[in-house]
Image (cartoon, coloured by chain):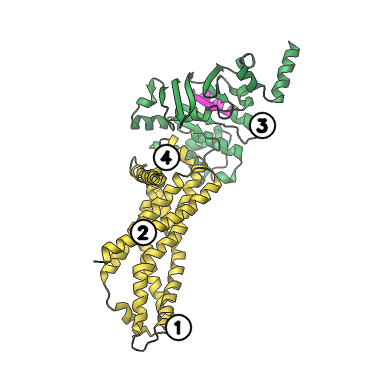
Chain colours: A yellow, B green
Amino acid sequence: MSYLEDIGSYFLMLKRTFGSFTKRSVLKELILKEIDDLIIGSLGIVAFISFFVGGVIAIQTALNVDNPIIPKSLIGFATRQSIVLEFAPTFISIIMAGKVGSFITSSIGSMRVTEQIDALEVMGINSLNYLVFPKIVALLFFPFVIALSMFLGILGGLVAGVYGGFTTLTDFTTGLQDDFDTFHLVYAFIKTFVFAFILATVPSWQGFYMKGGALEVGKASTNSFVWTSVLIILTNFIITQLLLSS
Amino acid sequence: MIKIENIRKSFGDEEILKGISTVFEKGKTNLIIGQSGSGKTVMLKCLLGLFQPEEGYIYYEDKAIQEMDEEQQRHLREEIGMLFQGGALFDSMTIEENVMFPLRMFTKKKKTEMLARVNEVLARVNLEGVNRKYPAEISGGMQKRVSIARAIVNNPKYLFCDEPNSGLDPKTATVIDNLIQEITHEYSITTVVVTHDMNSVMEIGENIVFLKNGKLVWQGNNEDIFKTDNKDVTDFVYSSDLFKKIRDIQIEEQ
């Protein structure tokens, strides 16, 4: 019963988020600030993780492919497929659920605890539109983060594969181009948009409706990470079934 | 003027407000007092429209808040200033941005005009030279004053204060009390203060509403409260040793 109430309040939150808009000039500033906090502020960690995980994928593929019949170009192929289909869109989103999601929940939760949300409501401001809508708009730029992750992941694979002596540049690039299906990119970016929406709204919901004090803000942040990750994994499964299994 | 008619509010099976009726007059500091759990904050939140009472009406001038549509309620809230218990200043904004916030949201003033008004109200609450600081960089008393400045910057018709003295030393608390009263008289605002601080009652209690267990049991001013023989009120007023001693001295002098 409690889960049904939670689902209901999540959708009611979405309805209120898109109603009674904040003044345009203020909203513009809020969106730019959120882009800075949520997107620009995440580029460093995403770049670091993507580059090295790309390298690890290439090395592990090389080490597990010791049959001389299998061409070395498989290293580039496997790196591309792993990164484009799953690592960049799904696992970077889960990492972002930890970084961005916890930030969103704790910042909105702290505002709830210190009556800042009440202050907005008393002033007649739609607090959900003021707080959540700019985050949704900012996370529309999330696909750029994922595109960067794809590029750096493949680059990491190339550097580790070629300079680690596991393959040649020609073999790796041949593998990258082998059997390339552009729909895989479409699929990855469709997933990314859905995950971006989950990333913006689920942590916001956790923070906005939390009750209690500082300890509960911490608990809400943890719950936010858990539920955002679970939803990302579930929607990943559903989207993959719908788009790739036919 | 705010008029309340027979409001009732429950949470689950527990009735918090049990049919309260009263009037909060314009240009006066109206105090809601009572012990913890008496329903003061719930009454304040009903006045603010944050809680909807199950029964009764709350009139702002001659219009009941329950009969206002969404647009009218939003317009009413633009005329309300609120001083929260913890200040409720926005952490991510400077003092200047905090005070300017209602002007940015609800007016079409130019930045220079808004800045002039911000400096005017900050000077009014005796705070100058803190414009660029963040709330975390100033003291609790200063935060309360910034909160008052933010509450009055857009010339509100109604000012609500929730425990304005909590967490403050007695001297700063008196400064805040006096500031609230001065502003109320100066701008002819209808001010409603929720408090359980007897010093505030003595300093600024021009119209006092005493609540007990969700009922209004006494109403008067800060002179009447020391003369009343209402047992609930006297138990509350003379619960501290200081006030007991004052009463004993008064009796001896008589």
* Mark 3: secondary structure: helix
Pinpoint residue A49: horizontal percent, then vertical percent. Answer: 45, 68
Which residues are drawn in magenta? B178-195
Real-space Cα distance between discs 1 and 2?
A: 36 Å
For the view shown, which residue lies furthest in the top direction?
B254
Which residue was labeled with disc 4?
B104
Image depth: mark 2 or mark 4 in front:
2
Real-space Cα distance between discs 3 and 1?
A: 72 Å
* Mark 4: secondary structure: helix
Image depth: mark 4 or mark 1 in front:
1
Real-space Cα distance between discs 2 and 3?
A: 58 Å
> Mark 1 or mark 2: which comes first in sequence?
1
* Mark 2: secondary structure: helix
Is residue A142 shown above or below B176? Answer: below
Badges 1 and 2, same chain: yes
Which residue was labeled with disc 1?
A164
